[in-house]
Every structure is written in structure tokens, then in C-alpha cells.
Image: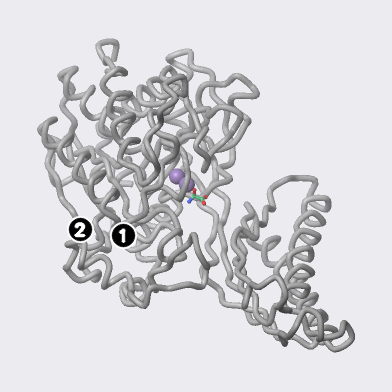
Amino acid sequence: MTDLHINTDRLLRELHHLATLTDCPPNTDTTLASPTTAVTRIVFTPRDLEARAYIRTLAEAAGFTLRVDAIGNTFIRFPGTDLTLPAVGTGSHTDAIPHAGMYDGTVGVLGGLEAMRSLKESGFIPKRSIETLMFTSEEPTRFGIGCIGSRLLGGSIDPTTADNLPDRLPETDPQATTGLTLHDVRTAAGFTASLDTVKLPPHYYHAWVELHIEQGPLLEREQIPIGIVTNIAAPASYRYEITGFGGHAGALLMPDRRDALCAAAETILSIEKHTLAANAASGTSDSVATVGTIAVHPGAINSVPSRVTLTLDIRDTDVARRNQIMSALHNDIREIESRRQVTITEQKINADVPAISDPHILATLESICTSNAIPYKKMVARAYHDTNFIAPIAPVAMLFIPCRNGVSHRPDEYATPESIALGTRVLALALAQLTKEVYTS
Ligand code: HGY
Ligand code: MN
Ligand code: MN
């Protein structure tokens, strides 16, 4: 398909405009690549709703059809000649964690839209419809669990459980909730239909490919322009509440203390110890664990902490190994509890399986790169993605492009225009090839 022209200027203009829809102050330093100091775009906030409206206007201007479901997942469709055939899908997310960058997720939404536009403008007529999906709430920031929109689409979260998720204020206290639920927040934002209507029917997609920045250093380090993702690590997250016995920092003597924060510190170091041991035993770096939020009560300089809450994000390409780390942590927790006379309760937020890419889609992506002399690397996705939750209902794969120094979830996240354009081109060629396939997957 030689006459396929990716309109890079248009795509970059749209990415930069989308970046200005942020709850962070605008960037006054014009030497920086990003038009904003950082991107914060939390699901169902006014900024998020502005971003959704912006994407919808672009889709309408391109002459594509639009559908928005009960949680706000937005389906942008390039209708094919045979509407009875399952579609070929792509897409990603536009919500962003606090003080993040402008490329995480957005490259997959605007890149998918540009792939469809450039195919349409080249005169390509798809047999199977092609669809770019903008998922709702990929980030766990507001409701404590990631990928709510795609979990509902693929059926891996119960709609009532989703609707009852508490609304959180992540930047203050991770336990602080507003008293509202996802149902309250989404209906106030205008998404009022029942979540029971979100789940996609079987075989809705013939094939699915998500374009995303790598959020790691390998492609840039090895100077390879395209990553083809063979499997996506399995995410799990837990919330811990550690309860001790508080008191006066001066009057409560050391032997009498049941310091919740000291017990938390030992718990955190136990997580690190067992994760490092798992990597040493496997000779890989495939096990990762992070305690990213912690709240101390009462949080006063001269008061012994009586209660600590913290969250654990633990991921592995191998679920059994992730479970081994968790059981080693549980043994340590029991010992810390009895020695320190504290209680440590664990609440599982999610414990998901890895996503394995479909061999046929992998072969399709490889053949496109080979026949276009585009160097590529087959690799593991360390971050999770909405593709994790489309995988149970469709054959999937992902395309990665390099990001500078592997940085992501930070304001200095950056991908070059050339990388974004090449990723979009490979995506467009893959969508064009997959849409012609008449067999049912
Ligand atoms: O945390 C993740 O892997 C994704 O960026 N939400
Ligand atoms: Mn992210
Ligand atoms: Mn992402």
C-alpha cells in the first residue's frame, strides 16, 4: 500500500492539543517538547470530559460513526463493506495519572484514528469494519483499579462491583474516599445507562491491535523503531491496613510501643526482599513490586503512628511466581504481627492473568515490518494495558514505539514524531490486512 500517507503534522497537532486539556498549569518554557508542564486527566473530571468531546469532534470530522457506551467507552467506526463480519479493533486510553506525560494512551487513540483516516484518504475500503476504541478509566487513580472500561467490555469485572467502587482522592490519602461511588460519578458525568449493557458479545472483534509507547528503555537502547508484544505481564494490587497502638512521641517508651509505621516499613522491605529473590532465582527481571501510596495516622511529628494504609502493585509474566512472592510475604506478615503486636489486614484489589498475543496477529505484524524493511523486536509488555482485558474475548497483540530514556508516568515522557508516525503506519497496514480476512477467528 504505497499511497498510504500518515498525516504526521495533523496527528502531532492533535496530540499537542489533547495535552493542553490537563489539570496542570500550562507550560511557559517553550523550549520543552510538551506544551504543558504535565498532564493530569483523571477519569470523569471536566478535563477528561473535554478530552472525550475533542476526540468525538475529530471522529465526526473524519466521517466515522460513533457509539458511546454506559461507562463512556467510545467506539469510532470506519464501516466495512460487510457489516455482518466481526470488526478489527484498535485503541487505547486518554485518561492520565497525576503529573504524567502526554503520550501514554493518547498515541493509541489518536494513532488509531489517524490510521483509519489515512486508510480512508488513500481510498482504501475495508471489508470488515475498523474500530478505534477510547477506553474509560485505564488508570487506577480514581477508583483504585485499572482498566475498568475494558474489564467491563471483556466481562472480567461484575457491573455491580464496578458501579460500587468508591471514589478516591489519590493525592491526599489513598484511603480517603469522597463517599461517592463510580455510579454516582459516572451518572453525574452523563453516563446513566446500566453497566450491564457494556459487555461485548462473543466474536465482536476478529482481531485487536493496540499501539502504545513502550514505557521502558529497550527499544530506544537497541535503536529499534517497533516493538511487537508477545505477552503482557499480569498485574495484581492489594491494599493493607496496619493497626498498632499510638501515643505520645515523648511519653510512650520504646518497649511499650506497637508502632504501625515501623511494622509497615518491615512489610515494605519484605516485599522488596522476596521480589528481588524471585528475580535472582529466575535469572530474569520479570517480577516487579511497588508500594506507591502510604498514609500514616494520625500523621503528627510527635505522635506514634497507630494506623498505616498502603497499596502494593505487584506484576509478573508468570502468575505462579507472583503467587510465590505473595505467600512469602504472608509468612513475614504473620511474624511481624506477632512480634510487633500489630494487626495487618490485606484486601485484594485485583489479581489478573498475563495476556498472550495471538500467533496469527504476531505473524501479520512481523510480515508487515519485514516487507517494509522496518526493524522490530518481539518483547514483553511490563505495564498493563486495556489489551489485557480484550484478550479474553478476541485475538490480540500490541505494537510499541520507543519513548525517551524509557520514561513514562512523568511529565518528561516523550516519543519522537518519527516514531509516532511509523507506529501509526505499521498499525494502519496491519488493520488493512486484518480487515480483508474473511475467515472467522
Ligand atoms: O500501571 C500501568 O501499567 C498502566 O500504565 N495503567
Ligand atoms: Mn499509564
Ligand atoms: Mn497506558
Identify the element where label 2 is drawn.
loop
Q: Position of residue 418 (x, y in %)?
A: 43, 17
Q: Is residue 76 above or below residue 166?
A: above
Figure coloring: one colour
Q: Is residue 11 above or below residue 327?
A: above
- Residue at (36% x, 48% y) in the render: 41
- Residue at (81% x, 60% y) in the render: 273
Question: On the picture, is 426 further left or further right than 349?
Answer: left
Question: In the rendered structure, are the residues bearing label 1 and label 2 in contact, judged by CB atoms less than 8 Å apart?
Answer: yes
In the image, the residue with mark 1 has its CB under 8 Å from the nearest atom of ligand 3: no
Q: Identify residue type, mark 2.
A: Asp
Q: Position of residue 8 (x, y in %)?
A: 31, 18
| Residue annotated with mark 2 | 69
Q: Earlier in the sequence, mark 1 or mark 2?
A: 2
Q: Identify residue type, mark 1.
A: Leu
Q: Is residue 174 above or below residue 257?
A: above
